[in-house]
Image: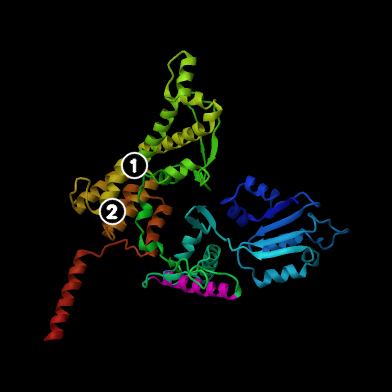
Amino acid sequence: GWMVLVVDEPALRTISSVLGMYDLMEHRITLTESLGKKRAPFREMGVIYLVSPTEESVDKIIEDWTTPAGATKKKPHLYGDNVFIYFLNKIPDSVIFKIKKCKSLLRRIKALAELNVDFLAKEKRVFHFDMKSSFANIFQSRQSLMPDVGQLLGSKLVTVCASMNEYPHIRYPANSQLCNDLAMTFHSLMNGFIGSNPTWWYYGGEGHKERDRSTLLILDRSSDVLSPFMHEFTYQAMVNDLLPIEDDKISYKPDVAENPDVEEKEVLLNENDQIWVELKTKHIADVIQTLSTRIRDIVNSDSGAKLAKDSGKSMSLSQMASALRSLPEYREVMSKLSQHMHISHQCMADFNKQNLLKLSELEQTLATGITEEGQTPRNSELMKDVESMLAETNSSNAARLIAITIISQNGLPPGDKERLFEVAQLSPEDKNLIQNLERLGVSLEQAEVSKISTMKSMFRSTARRATA
């Protein structure tokens, strides 16, 4: 029969990254509810709980099946007698013990299992662990990885490998203690998973030789500190860099010129949008060209010609596109094309407003050490260009430009660094951001030339005495 699906917040984010409500209904899920909110009873239906393996989530499940202490009458159960409990990750013994103690819940459980899906599958070949605060925690100390952070990262990585039937070889830079710690933690947890799941198989193992075992390459951000600060002009990069997007959701206001009172629309830019999948990695100029060509092709089709003829007047491209959206056979495709045209033009509007062309040319010169003309600029010229750019850009771009300058030049003389800070008028938060680059192995300041010369002279003098 039909079932109710109850999820906690981590499970909701996990399942939402791969399934929609229609997909769930096809599997006889009539309703999805939040474990943390008050819920209406559906006593004629069974319930599926999909939750993270935490005591907090299990306590809320138990609340559905127990009467609070001190209550004057027995609390009716929310759901029918068929209960299925699935966890995103390995179930701790403390959680199992809590479930076993709740007799009213225990006798109704028809299934209890670990699904090993404690990650978000954002794209066909991209996943992440939904740990927004992990970056600061990982780099609090460059000496080692905090044990609790390592255990969490390692356990989530095990669920990725378990779901893909991979038991990978592990490779990491020998000079990175963080990578070493995570590699050791993951290796231990992965072996523990295999030992406790004898029926689980992996590619390259006995009976599955169609391909070899995969390789897991572990790197930390210190291997490439520069790239995240550089402006990139592919469609996906610009949307995430310039526009207010959250969990793939973005708002835009269509046809503002023709109808100023039109309401904003919310759209999802994810794997369900085929135009997004096709164009997201292309340069923004190519994206706009492709969208314009496709809209023009439809406008110049037989249906477009008929609309123009019926209107009895000359129509602009945008007017024709709006008219075509009223035709059933073009409604969906024209809506999608127009949506992406609006979003891409919004990106270009911000690109021009922030003067990112000029800024990006300077960024490339700093990163490569070569100008657009192929010349190698003097350091004094570079600093002059950076100061000039800082005076005319916004605070966010100013902090990024200073970071790029410091990283690309392997640090700055103390006087230059302080002068750039002053010109940019950085906030305390932005100054702290720059200072924290040291945690990634970046040298903020160059040793003074005079000190370097003195040290070299001392070394040569010592060497001469040693050979005398």
Outermost residue toward the left in this view: 468
Corner quadrant of residue 169: bottom left
Res. 455 in view: yes
Residue for point 34% across, 54% down: 403
- Coordinates of residue 430 in the picture (x, y in percent): 40, 53
In this rendering, position of residue 382 left or right of residue 57: left
CA separation in Å, label 2 and label 1: 16 Å
- Coordinates of residue 203 in the picture (x, y in percent): 50, 67
Q: 371 and 81: which one is in front? A: 81
Secondary structure under tag 1 reads: helix
Q: Is residue 58 above or below residue 2?
A: below
Corner quadrant of residue 107: bottom right
Quarter of the picture containing the C terminus is bottom left
- Coordinates of residue 295 in the picture (x, y in percent): 43, 30
Residue for point 23% across, 50% down: 382
Q: Is residue 312 magenta?
A: no
In this rendering, position of residue 285 left or right of residue 71: left
Residue 356 tag number? 1
Which portion, as a residue range, is magenta? Answer: 176-195
Res. 257 in view: no
The residue type indicated by label 2 comes to Ala
Residue under pointer 2? 367
Outermost residue toward the right in this view: 72
> Which mark sits nearer the N-terminus, 2 or 1?
1
Secondary structure under tag 2 reads: helix
| Badge 1 density bin: few <14, some 14–19, many ≥20, Cα 10 Å | some
| Badge 2 density bin: few <14, some 14–19, many ≥20, Cα 10 Å | some
Q: Is residue 188 magenta?
A: yes
